[in-house]
Image (cartoon, grey):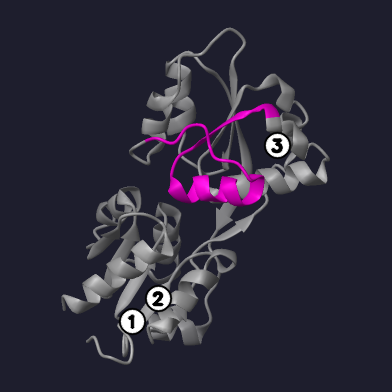
């Protein structure tokens, strides 16, 4: 399957990332001569509550000592809303926690600073355990997906933290064209970057997935396994380099 013309020559690879996040990965795959099928299984849209609870939290950022981001989308949505409300500089005094590397990289990109806390194991439960003991009046702001799991907020509350978890965005499942849907049935490989991408893809075409599956991170792999989807490879990190290595390693093993 591998040739001198490109590590992925002749291989069709489905990218399920949201459209605004997929360009770099698609270009990397195309450089290896993969036939890329862009089939976004999630799209990021404002929360159904209109964003008023998020606005309320942003306008009161001075009351928080920490902000804990659960995804790169939470970073982008919070900062975009903060910029529109003219409060972006109020993030400066906050300590920042990130659940994983992609989230930390988004903080660096958007806020030009390193995060203060990143768990060794990139899970919300581990981030909650990694937090220091709260001091008097300590409070955490947790912007998240409206349908996101409550693990981080619950874990922090169990440890005595005051937490405001607020919907910053929601994920929806976009429709695919008939042409794209037809290509999916014959794809060699499919890449999932998050549990929501897995769930969205299943909504789009059902549980029948014959392609080899590559996941970013153990949490995404577990989401596949819970749906009965076999996972062929798990990228060590969300970086394009590690993801490309997982794809090429899986391709060369078959």
Q: Which residue is mark 2?
A: 14
Mark 1 and mark 2: span between their CA atoms? 7 Å
Eyeballing the image, is 27 above or below 92? below
Indicate the secondary structure of the residue bearing disc 1.
Answer: loop
Residue bearing mark 1: 187
Which residue, as the protein is rendered here, is positioned at the far right? 86
Q: Residue at x 52, y 62 (%)?
A: 42
- Is residue 146 or residue 2 the one in the foreground? 2
Residue 115 forms part of the magenta stretch: yes
Whether residue 185 is visible to the viewer of this picture, yes or no, is: no
The boundaries of the magenta stretch are: 93-119
Residue 189 point in image, percent of width and height: 31, 75
Graded by Cα atoms within 10 Å as few (under 14), some (14 to 19) or many (20 or more), the crowding at tag 3 reads many
- Please tell me whether mark 2 sits on a helix, a strand or a loop: strand
Left or right: 5 in relation to 20 = left
Mark nearer the N terminus (1 vs 2) = 2
Residue at the spot x=60%, y=52% of the render?
109
Q: Is residue 215 magenta?
A: no
Q: How many marks?
A: 3
Can you identify the residue that label 3 sits on? Answer: 54
Sort mark 1 into few (<14), some (14-19) or many (20+) by Cα contacts within 10 Å: some
* Pointer 1 with pointer 2, Cβ within 8 A: yes
Above or below: residue 117 compared with residue 240: above
Pointers 1 and 3 in contact (C-beta within 8 Å): no
- Dot 1 or dot 3: first in sequence order is 3
> Can I make out residue 218 in this image?
yes
Name the residue located 30 percent from the left edge and 49 percent from the top edge. Answer: 218
């Amino acid at each position: 399957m591998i040739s001198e013309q490109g590590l992925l020559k002749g291989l069709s690879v489905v990218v399920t990332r949201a459209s605004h996040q997929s360009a770099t990965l698609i270009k990397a795959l195309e450089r290896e001569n993969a036939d890329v099928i862009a089939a976004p299984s999630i799209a990021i849209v404002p929360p159904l509550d209109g964003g008023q609870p998020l606005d309320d939290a942003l306008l009161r950022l001075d009351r928080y000592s920490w902000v804990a981001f659960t995804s790169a989308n939470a970073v982008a949505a919070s900062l975009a809303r903060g910029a529109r409300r003219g409060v972006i500089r109020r993030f400066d005094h906050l300590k920042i926690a990130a659940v994983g590397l992609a989230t930390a990289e988004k903080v660096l990109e958007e806020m030009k600073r390193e995060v203060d806390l990143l768990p060794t194991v990139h899970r919300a439960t581990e981030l909650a355990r990694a937090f220091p003991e709260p001091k008097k009046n300590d409070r955490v702001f947790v912007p998240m997906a409206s349908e996101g799991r409550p693990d981080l907020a619950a874990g922090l509350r169990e440890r005595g933290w005051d937490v405001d978890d607020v919907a910053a965005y929601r994920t929806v499942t976009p429709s695919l064209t008939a042409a794209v849907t037809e290509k999916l049935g014959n794809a060699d490989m499919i890449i999932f970057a998050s549990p929501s991408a897995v769930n969205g893809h299943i909504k789009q075409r059902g549980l029948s997935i014959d392609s080899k599956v590559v996941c970013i991170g153990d949490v995404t792999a577990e989401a596949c396994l819970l749906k009965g989807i076999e996972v062929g490879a798990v990228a060590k990190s969300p970086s394009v380099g590690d993801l490309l290595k997982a794809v090429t390693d899986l391709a060369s093993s078959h």
